[in-house]
Amino acid sequence: MPLPDVQSSEPDIRINLTRVGVTDVKKLVKVLRKDKRPIILISTFDIFVDLPKDRKGANLSRNFEAIDEVLEETTFEPVTEIEELCSRISEELLKRHEYASRAEVHMRSEYVIRRETPVTKMKCQEVVDIFASAISTREDGVTTRKSIGAEVVGMTACPCAQGMMKEIAIKKLRELGMNDKEIEEFIACVPIATHNQRGRGFISIEVGGKDKIPSLDRIIEIIEDSMSTRIYELLKRNDEARVVMDAHRNPKFVEDCVREMARRVVEEFPQLSDDAVITIKQVNEESIHRHNAFAEKIATMGELRRELNGG
Amino acid sequence: MPLPDVQSSEPDIRINLTRVGVTDVKKLVKVLRKDKRPIILISTFDIFVDLPKDRKGANLSRNFEAIDEVLEETTFEPVTEIEELCSRISEELLKRHEYASRAEVHMRSEYVIRRETPVTKMKCQEVVDIFASAISTREDGVTTRKSIGAEVVGMTACPCAQGMMKEIAIKKLRELGMNDKEIEEFIACVPIATHNQRGRGFISIEVGGKDKIPSLDRIIEIIEDSMSTRIYELLKRNDEARVVMDAHRNPKFVEDCVREMARRVVEEFPQLSDDAVITIKQVNEESIHRHNAFAEKIATMGELRRELNGG
Amino acid sequence: MPLPDVQSSEPDIRINLTRVGVTDVKKLVKVLRKDKRPIILISTFDIFVDLPKDRKGANLSRNFEAIDEVLEETTFEPVTEIEELCSRISEELLKRHEYASRAEVHMRSEYVIRRETPVTKMKCQEVVDIFASAISTREDGVTTRKSIGAEVVGMTACPCAQGMMKEIAIKKLRELGMNDKEIEEFIACVPIATHNQRGRGFISIEVGGKDKIPSLDRIIEIIEDSMSTRIYELLKRNDEARVVMDAHRNPKFVEDCVREMARRVVEEFPQLSDDAVITIKQVNEESIHRHNAFAEKIATMGELRRELNGG
Amino acid sequence: MPLPDVQSSEPDIRINLTRVGVTDVKKLVKVLRKDKRPIILISTFDIFVDLPKDRKGANLSRNFEAIDEVLEETTFEPVTEIEELCSRISEELLKRHEYASRAEVHMRSEYVIRRETPVTKMKCQEVVDIFASAISTREDGVTTRKSIGAEVVGMTACPCAQGMMKEIAIKKLRELGMNDKEIEEFIACVPIATHNQRGRGFISIEVGGKDKIPSLDRIIEIIEDSMSTRIYELLKRNDEARVVMDAHRNPKFVEDCVREMARRVVEEFPQLSDDAVITIKQVNEESIHRHNAFAEKIATMGELRRELNGG
């Protein structure tokens, strides 16, 4: 029985739509990274195309065919990075939705990284959130911009409260007869109290055309190293002491974390073109408040470079 | 003891930040709407300013002083709409953060609307999600753009599956000896099965300067009326029958819901200027899948008007 | 048209059900507490009855009629506590579901408390989560057990890491020539660093029959005072210094917080009978890990009393 | 430097604690099921022991050592089921926390199952939520009870609204001159409209000692088959028609779904002893309301057997 194709009929209200698609689609994804063990992810996809004004509906099942075909192909021709997977799917979408001029694929997943603790060097697993996306547009041929990103939890210690605690410590040490040089030596060696908390850092990098995107693992390390300290699922007593000391020797506002991430992105990814778009965020789950502190920088790589060069 | 002001010092990394602020701040808000009972909301605010490159940190406690002062003032000079509250706060933020050129306030809340059921006319309460925001920029004087929006749950029935079920019904009725006119009469009277589900419609409207924003209650009604049917917390048997019939007589794709909302926004809000920005979304929690169907239209009021006039 | 009552027919599979009902029902609730301003809450209710084996379904719309009637009545005969509201609804449910032998009502809500900051005495609002429930059973007459509870966010500082940091401080102070008495004086005055974080404390108290339940406001204060320190939405610099000092002078494990809450419940609520059931929990969102630390004590009031008396 | 062991000291408040541990611990888990492909899960664990009154704190890092050692061992001696993994961990916990008399392990994960669509037989992946736990107690030796469960999304169609729509159809068919036999034939062949929606079914089975627990895959199939129909991520037009027809031919209340699951558990798992504890739930995300319908049965296997045998 040939079924009526309601979707391809004319709609009563003739306006085009910016995005039509499906959200919260879960798929097993296998990624074969160069020189590394393969990773298997349960990823959640949101997939959209635009819709012209003379078409009632998009054939949403084609979105699944596009994902499934690309995932199938990866058995023979593996993807090495998740943004590559997204761009393959978004290009496949434009092939299958012949009426669309734009296709968009977003994926998010949990990803396990291996770390070792700072003192006792025990192995531990840490779970981070990773993201990738691709937007393909059809004009003269198909162009694709793709992005990759991660959100990682670390620890931040507040410089402002630490400044106030330091005043108290210095005052007391003076009262007890210590001289300035001794006080300086004490402060340099002993961590001064402050409020500290879980912070969540985020970087995403969007590039066009043939630009080579940095590796996710490198992005994750930059996020971890831009907070007061990395954190670990498993800490022996000596590890815990080290983490607490490190955090207190390296206090950071949300603003500091974002600026540090920006600096490192510019320094460590010289291959990115000036039109790459960088989004950087930091959220601190303040231990002294119920609300969070937040900072964000959105800029092109060119803008970041100029700013950091004092332009 | 005069405390050191760490935030106003120079940062080591001199880049400006797009947004610095606090998120998930909860406040009791009282709104005195014209000719209506006052409403009390527990609202969640996100509040940001930008930060110049020569300043280490924003004084986040000023954000609270700005909210608190505006909320305090409303005791004497009540706000009548939530977007007005946001714009008062964002303008207050620019006063208090003298170094900022941009302030941004977002609020979200649950809001109770009163409805009556379609047949038995019982009273019931329905809870919807509401949103407002304001962005103030300082150039020659302060300019503020503000927006308001809502997300409402309703019911959608799928036209495509219904088309297929109709084929089956028609075929059977023919087999049983009914003629075309009788079949048409049957189809017109009896709801034909299809999959149906909760849908979530969303409209937000952003306007600049002195533009008058439509009332939230009117926006909520447009969202409700653009799905297959409104839904209700309490339904007597006859009400339930009516809701099911209504939904099946008015099947809608996600795309249809978005286009219907767009049409109604243009028709019912002639006062909006062409540069108002309209965002419309529909999510259907498909009963035949684990994933959701999604459609979105983002356009200026001018673009929407031109499209609907066949431009 | 008299409609068929499918629910009252016999089911094919004759087993009784433990709970049948509705979840996530939102309602505006007004509570008129003694000697205090009235409060208006948007509350979420879960409502259940049991179902005998000879009945296909429960009439779920009766649950709404029961809530609505009780809420309506409160206009004339106000409730003064939320657990009283739940018990009125659960008793009304047993009246309306004549086949049921047990009715159960749970409600949860956000609740705004007023606090002032420790040093500058500024007023601020804090939002906490509150809970109430009632279970009515029909045997010879109707008996109702009811409960009330709250979850509140505060700050905890780790005693273990602080112990390690103290060792470092003492060692350095000795190196710099301080004697034991001076060191003791320093430690008593200056807060020693440790990791600290948001903690969430929880107490619920369930009583039977005519037992008088303690006030929610008192329960909330016990939770707040059993962590290392209370926290505040708005803190001036001197307030922040005080909060950080207080937390570091009063370090607490999750276990300590639970035991402290238990001690205070016994001490401050002598009116509770021995068969009241007390549930106490503490979750620390550890700043040095991605996971949380957790402790819980579930016991009758009689058991708690015996334990605390060394029984 | 030998560090002070704060946790093993005496607490000021001498009460024992019901549960002390860690929550939201994420780990990669590999399960080698018999005759099947190995599966890799990102699982979230909650892990607790009890704490005697004379001990200030539990050594939470031992929880990680226990998990890590068991996961490590599985490389050599693989687990074939997730509840087996939990019971190995809970027994290891009792070894490492020599002061504890009870250890508890809960794990949850997403799990991908393979299905094919009902008509076109396309392959698709469906994601379900799975759970396992184990509780070990130390008295004369160690005893462990373990459980396994799953939550699966399907579709339910309401029998009550369908009954009302059927009345309307029959009345109209009569008006149009159809006789009773023809009407019956029509109703038997053509799906009659009703509201339908996503339903979530849940079964968990807890057994003691040496009882063999049923396979997770079989439990998932029972849940799927107890709703009006299974649902699929990918549906061609003919598949969609079939799913809609199936749902409408098999309308189910929440109560029906729970009773059907109970019947199948008794029928399909004769190996379970009478003291196995069965928890069965169904939540329907009603398309005509914002709230959910809910039913639950908690009983021992013995009770279920007696009820189903008319006892």
Image (spheres, coloured by chain):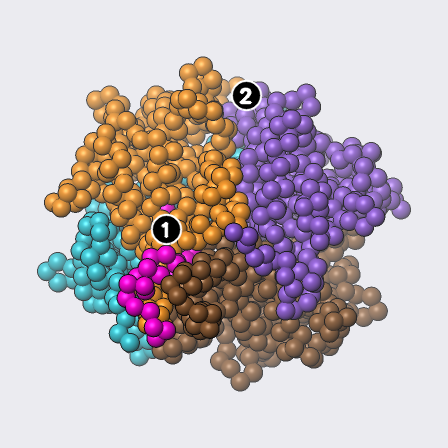
Chain colours: A orange, B cyan, C brown, D purple
Tell me, yes or no, if residue B204 can be seen here.
no
Q: Which residue is mark 2?
A: D122
- Range of magenta residues: A175-201
Q: Residues within 10 Å of mark 2 (few under 14, many from 20)?
A: few
Q: Name the kind of residue labelled 1 in the image.
A: Ser
Residue B161 pos. (x, y %):
51, 32
In which quadrant of the rendered view does residue C190 lie? bottom left
Residue B230 pos. (x, y %):
48, 51
As rendered, which of A136 and C115 lies closer to the eye? C115
- Residue C99 vs residue D120: left or right? right
- Residue A197 painted magenta: yes
Residue drawn at x 15%, y 43% is: A309
Residue D75 pos. (x, y %):
62, 28
Q: Which residue is mark 1?
A: A228
Q: Is residue B260 above or below residue A43?
A: below
Output the chain of dot 2. Answer: D
